[in-house]
Amino acid sequence: MTAPATTQTDRWNVFAIIAFVTVWFTIILGLVFGHLALSQIKTTGEKGRGLALAAVIIGWVAVALGALAAMFILIFGGLAISANT
């Protein structure tokens, strides 16, 4: 395990920016880039932790909402089909 960087640089982490943009279009890529960015920021001290964290939070919330929607459709769709027979 590497120690966190002691000084913060003025550079922005590119993965953090990419993660925040892509999470709105492709959730999985946004999550992957967000987790990569958080890992890099911990070791390099670059800027962008907030962007990466926002991408990860938005991504996991979207995954959870998608799973709930899928369960809702499966449960109530199955009930509607069985009610018609």
Image (tube, rainbow, N blue to C red):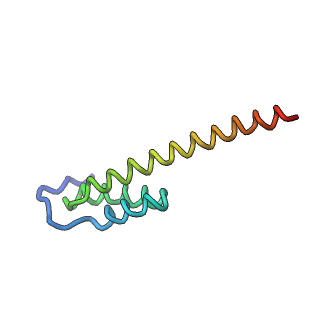
In this rendering, is residue 85 above or below 54?
above
Quarter of image, res 33: bottom left
In the image, residue 38 lies at what x, y percent? 31, 55
Horizontal side, residue 27 vs residue 49: left or right: right
Residue lying farthest to the front in this orientation: 84
User: What residue sits 63% from the left and 37% below the top?
Assistant: 72
Q: Residue furthest left?
A: 7
Q: Is residue 50 left or right of residue 83?
A: left
Residue 22 at x, y percent in the picture: 42, 63
In the image shown, does 4 or 54 lie closer to the viewer?
A: 54
Image location (x, y in percent) of residue 20: 36, 59
- Residue 37 picture quarter: bottom left
Location of the C terminus by quadrant is: top right
**82, 7: nearer the viewer:** 82
Q: Is residue 80 left or right of residue 22?
A: right
In the rendered view, would you say 70 is above or below 21?
A: above
Which residue lies at the image location 38% right of the left edge and 47% below the top edge? 57
Tell me where residue 32 sits by quadrant: bottom left
The location of residue 74, given as percent across then percent down, is 69, 40
Q: Residue at x 67, y 41 (%)?
A: 73
12 is higher (above) or lower (below) than 54: below
Looking at the image, which residue sits at the far right? 85
| In front of the other: 4 or 38 | 38
Residue located at (14% from left, 64% from top): 9
